[in-house]
């Protein structure tokens, strides 16, 4: 596998890697500026491109996403790694827990759709959806209702996987609080009303709108990627890390899915973030998958 990289050029947002140029691009959505990192290779340009979505409260500059883009570029593949807005204008970096949360799990599907259509407008004829962690469930939410024919397949790294009971238990274990009582309170409030000093996702004692709390904690199959994949209509490759304790139920839940569009690969030794050489194995598996499309 090629591993040739060039140093940054002209500005922080531009770089060259194996005859590829990267830049930050943006579009407008509900009075918000959305941004994404675009890497175009000489080999494929916009024509064949991966659309990558990050995980919970994360961003496109985190290690797993930047490594993914660089390694794809080494193999001649273009990519667009997006930042979900999470309700904020021109968002960069991890979500600051001091900022009031006003976003919902389901919002991501609409933003992924916007970027997919943007790529189509740029001339993309083959779009491969790609995602990590919660971004995986959000991506499959979109792909199951997708109307963009240029989307040909999806590649998911350690996608979100949880049952209703596990969903509730995780909150109890993390915060030693009963989820049901807080959820009931949130559902009794106006969606834009703010819950103060509330434990939410990875943020302790934060501020969150009632609608956001309900959007993340009222259980739905949209939180369980294996359940969503029962309805998948495009070729799908899921990577499992054998040492991943973040989505520990993923292998078992995927094993209950019958769909001839689904392939799985377990990478021995990898945790939830597939660091270092484990990403090389992800790329190797992806190349084999792409050859079969």
Image: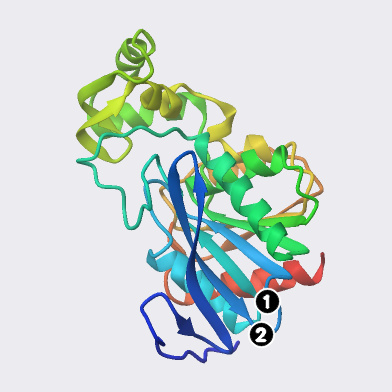
For the residues labelled 1 and 2, the Cα–Cα distance comes to: 6 Å
- On the image, the x and y values in percent for residue 73 come to 58, 79
Q: Which colour scheme appears in the figure?
A: rainbow
Q: Are marks 1 and 2 in contact (CB under 8 Å)?
A: yes
Residue tagged 2 = 42
Give the quarter of the image for residue 62. Answer: bottom left
Residue 4 spot, x, y in % from top left:
52, 92
Name the secondary structure under disc 2.
Answer: loop
Identify the disc placed on residue 120: none
Residue for point 43% across, 45% down: 32
The C terminus: image quadrant: bottom right
Name the residue nearer the viewer: 127 or 236.
127
Report if residue 168 is visible in the image. no
Helix, strand or loop status at disc 1 = loop
Q: Can see residue 62?
A: yes
Badge 2, how many Cα within 10 Å: few under 14, some, many 20+?
A: some
Identify residue for label 1: 45
Residue 191: which quarter of the image? Answer: top left
Q: How many numbered callouts?
A: 2
Please give left or right for residue 143 compared with residue 15 in the image. right
Instruction: Look at the image and tell me in which quarter the N terminus lies.
Output: bottom right
Of residue 142 and residue 235, the one placed in the foreground of this image is 142
Query: Residue shown at 64%/56% (left/top)?
Result: 118
Residue displayed at 69% across by 64% down: 122
Question: Is 168 located above or below residue 152 in the figure?
Answer: above
Query: Compared with residue 87, is residue 45 higher up or lower down, i.e. above or below?
Result: below
Residue 101's spot in the image, x, y percent? 31, 34
Say few, some or many: other residues with alpha carbon within 10 Å of mark 1 (under 14 / 14 to 19 / 20 or more). Answer: some
């Amino acid at each position: 596998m090629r591993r040739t990289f060039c140093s940054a050029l002209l500005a922080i947002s531009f770089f060259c890697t194996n005859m590829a140029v990267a830049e930050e691009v943006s579009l407008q959505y509900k009075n918000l500026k959305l941004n994404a990192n675009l890497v175009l290779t000489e080999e494929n340009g916009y024509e064949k491109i991966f659309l990558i979505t990050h995980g919970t409260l994360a961003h496109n500059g985190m290690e797993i996403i930047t490594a993914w883009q660089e390694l794809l570029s080494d193999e001649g593949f273009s990519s667009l790694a997006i930042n979900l807005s999470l309700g904020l204008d021109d968002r960069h970096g991890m979500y600051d827990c001091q900022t009031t949360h006003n976003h919902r799990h389901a919002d991501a599907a609409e933003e992924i759709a916007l970027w997919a259509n943007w790529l189509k407008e740029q001339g993309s004829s083959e779009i491969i959806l790609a995602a990590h962690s919660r971004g995986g469930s959000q991506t499959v939410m979109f792909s199951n209702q997708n109307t963009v024919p240029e989307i040909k397949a999806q590649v998911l790294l350690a996608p979100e996987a949880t049952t209703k009971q596990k969903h509730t238990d995780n909150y109890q274990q993390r915060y030693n609080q009963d989820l049901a009582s807080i959820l009931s309170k949130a559902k009794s409030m106006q969606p834009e009303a703010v819950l103060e000093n509330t434990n939410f996702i990875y943020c302790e004692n934060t501020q969150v709108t009632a609608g956001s709390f309900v959007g993340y904690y009222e259980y739905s199959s949209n939180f369980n990627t294996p359940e969503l994949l029962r309805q998948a209509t495009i070729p799908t490759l899921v990577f499992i890390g054998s040492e991943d304790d973040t989505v520990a139920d993923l292998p078992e839940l995927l094993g209950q899915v019958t769909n001839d569009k689904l392939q799985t690969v377990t990478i021995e030794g990898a945790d939830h973030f597939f660091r270092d050489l484990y990403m090389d194995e992800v790329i190797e598996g992806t190349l084999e998958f792409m050859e079969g499309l």
